[in-house]
Image (cartoon, rainbow, N blue to C red):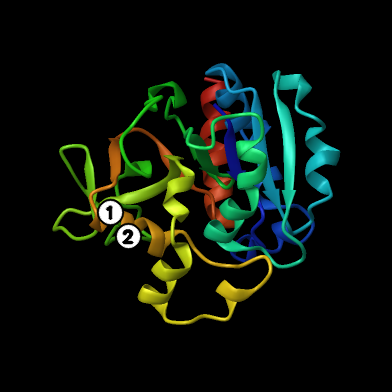
Amino acid sequence: MKALIFAAGLGERMRPLSLHTPKPLLAVGGKRLIEWHLEKLAGIGVREVVINTSWLAEQFPATLGDGARWGLRLRFSYEGDTPLETGGGMLHALELLHEGVDPHAPFIVANGDIWTDYDFAALPREFDGDAHLLLVDNPVQRPLGDFQLENGRIDNEGESRLTYSGIGLYRASLFDDWRAVLNAALGDTADAHRTPPRFSTVPLLRASAARGRIGGEHHRGRWTDVGTPERLQQLDAALTAEQHA
């Protein structure tokens, strides 16, 4: 199984720290955020990880190398000066994710600017549908959540919605008729007609969930969207204190 780590964002909420360092390369607990993911992925047998890049893209290969230190092969999917968002970025990376494997095989996706104690080994190796998403309790910055989870299936509406963690399993089938899905959800958008196109996965996930093609699970452990300098500092302090306890 391969994996994709989203690392192309501009990190605007993390400024000034992200002016010179991409968010996923900022450190907490003595490791860069992306390194926590790479260690976990290597630990469950993933051997190839695609990292999408844009902002300060040259720092990723310069800092991480080819992945050999983790027993991984790292591939970099450069998106140009403007990040392609999650949907465009994933679509752009599919060629690398499919290289040498069954194009219907699932792959792991993780946002490069989150930290969690979730064990990636708990992700199912097989699942029905287009995606399997890890949901978490709603953080203060997202009180209404994203999706309802009931009996292992994800719905768009519900009274006790949870927040998408930024970790999941995906299949390329999520992108079947993606232009039609975007047009139905958003109308005819210029970004979708760019080369390469720029769009979010959210409309695709919601359309797939409406068809009953997305499963999920609820992680009740620790999870942080490390989106601001304050949250980065708080997480670093907590992890450092635990290491020295």
How many other residues sit within 10 Å of disc 2, few (<14), some (14-19) or many (≥20)? many
Q: On the image, numbered disc 1 is attached to which residue?
A: 209
Answer with the quarter of the image where residue 156 lies.
Answer: bottom left
| Residue type at the position of mark 2 | Arg
Q: On the image, numbered disc 2 is attached to which residue?
A: 206
Residue 27 visible in this rendered orientation of the protein = no
- The residue at 61%/21% (across/down) is 42
Task: Please count the marks in the image.
Answer: 2
Answer yes or no: do the residues labelled 1 and 2 have beta carbons within 8 Å?
Answer: yes
Determine whether 103 is above or below 122 in the image. below
Image side of residue 102 versus residue 23, left or right: left
- The residue at 17%/53% (across/down) is 160
How many other residues sit within 10 Å of disc 1, few (<14), some (14-19) or many (≥20)? many
Q: CA distance from mark 1 to mark 2?
A: 5 Å
| Residue type at the position of mark 1 | Ala
- The residue at 62%/60% (across/down) is 14
Determine whether 135 is above or below 108 in the image. below
Residue 74, percent from left and from top: 73, 33
Please tell me the numbered disc located at residue 241. Answer: none
The quadrant of the image that shows the N terminus is top right
Residue 237 visible in this rendered orientation of the protein = yes
Answer with the quarter of the image where residue 84 lies.
Answer: bottom right
Nearest the eye: 192 or 108:
192
- The residue at 80%/30% (across/down) is 66
Residue 224, percent from left and from top: 46, 44
Residue 182, percent from left and from top: 43, 70
In what element is the residue under mark 1?
helix
In what element is the residue under mark 2?
helix
